[in-house]
Amino acid sequence: MAKGIDPQESLAALFGCRVRKLRTAAGLTQAELGRMTHVVSTRITQIERASGARPSQELAQALDAALVADDLLVDLWPYVYREAFPDWVQAFMALSARATAIRQYLAHVVPGLLQTEPYARALLSVGRTLKSEEQLEERLSARMARQTRLRGADRPELWVILDEAVLRRPVGGPDVMRDQLARLLATAEEPHITVQVLPFAHGEHGVLGGSLTVLDLPDGTETAYTEGAHYGQLIEDPEEVGRFAVTYDLLRAAALPPHMSLDMIRSAMEDNHHDATVVSRSDRRRLAQKQLQQSGRGRLRRGGGRTPRSRPRP
């Protein structure tokens, strides 16, 4: 057991204790293990003490290889990173990790499984619960790691319906958004991934303002998950899940066919994000101040004085 750390406190503590036990058994110092895994020795200290950011998947793999852990650390890692999320998110992640098919509708953003790293970083940087740069990197690493399932032998069928608003909002700026749209076009070429767009013209629908995911599980059952900006709900009651599955099918029928959807994505990439300029926050603030100054009775002269009001002639 690492000094002062109880492995039963958390999965991160258990992971740290296992790393320390394997390291000492191998006769390695923290500095030596750090050099073998290309991190500073203080990072090894943080992991063994379960302090600081949780290890990334890449670091867990490097530690496993360096310590000849026979995939012990690699297998433990998914549970370590899920621990940082609320219980309902952890449950959804665990189910998603073994789903045979994933059906998603997104109203505002590209789903995490298809996000580029810069796009994901822009989204995670404005999270209300974000506490530090280390936590940002931890969450970013976890999100990118989940995408590896789409490239594995047990990859699920992925069907994504994007509201048109997802294509129009330049998350991270025009360059980041253009690359993200290009990523959507590329991934849609994969035989197990289908992307559709629900256009503004469709109007109201059953999931307006939120998102919906329906998971097909190996045992033949289904689970639904709905999410807003700061909440989520896992639905497992078969009757209720069935209603959400029908809702999703209605959205799929109303969305543009896949080939027309890709045309809309190309159009958004070329028209909305080609050489686009986004006014910075500081520029917007200066413009607002200028407009406020000019909205009073007396307008500021170039020299700073007020223009005198004209008086009626006697």
Image: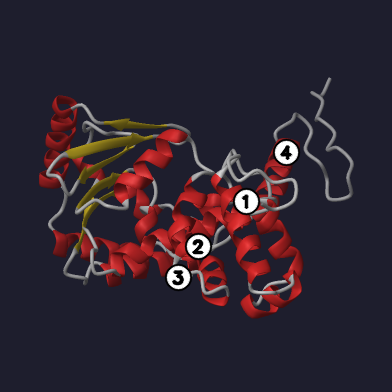
Given this view, does label 2 or label 4 mark the residue nearer the observer? 2
In primary-sequence order, the first of circles 1 and 2 is 2
Residue holding disc 4: 294
Q: Position of residue 313 (x, y in %)?
A: 81, 24
Distance from the alpha carbon under mark 3 to that under mark 2: 8 Å
Given this view, does label 1 or label 2 mark the residue nearer the observer? 2
Residue holding disc 2: 73
Among all residues in the image, which is located at the extreme top? 314
Given this view, does label 3 or label 2 mark the residue nearer the observer? 3
With respect to residue 297, does 254 lie above or below?
A: below
Distance from the alpha carbon under mark 4 to that under mark 3: 70 Å
Q: Are the residues at dot 3 and dot 2 in contact (C-beta closer than 8 Å)?
A: no
Q: What residue type is labelled 3?
A: Asp
Q: Position of residue 265 (x, y in %)?
A: 29, 63
Q: In this view, does 138 lie to the left or right of 28?
A: left
Residue holding disc 3: 70
Q: How is the image coloured?
A: secondary structure
Which residue occupies the foreground of this view, 194 or 82? 82
Q: Residue 195 sits in which quadrant? A: bottom left
Q: Quadrant of the C terminus?
A: top right
Q: Are the residues at dot 2 and dot 4 in contact (C-beta closer than 8 Å)?
A: no
Q: Give the structural element (helix, strand or loop) at label 1.
A: helix
Given this view, does label 1 or label 4 mark the residue nearer the observer? 1
Distance from the alpha carbon under mark 1 to that under mark 4: 43 Å
Residue holding disc 1: 135
Q: Which amino acid does label 1 sit on?
A: Gln
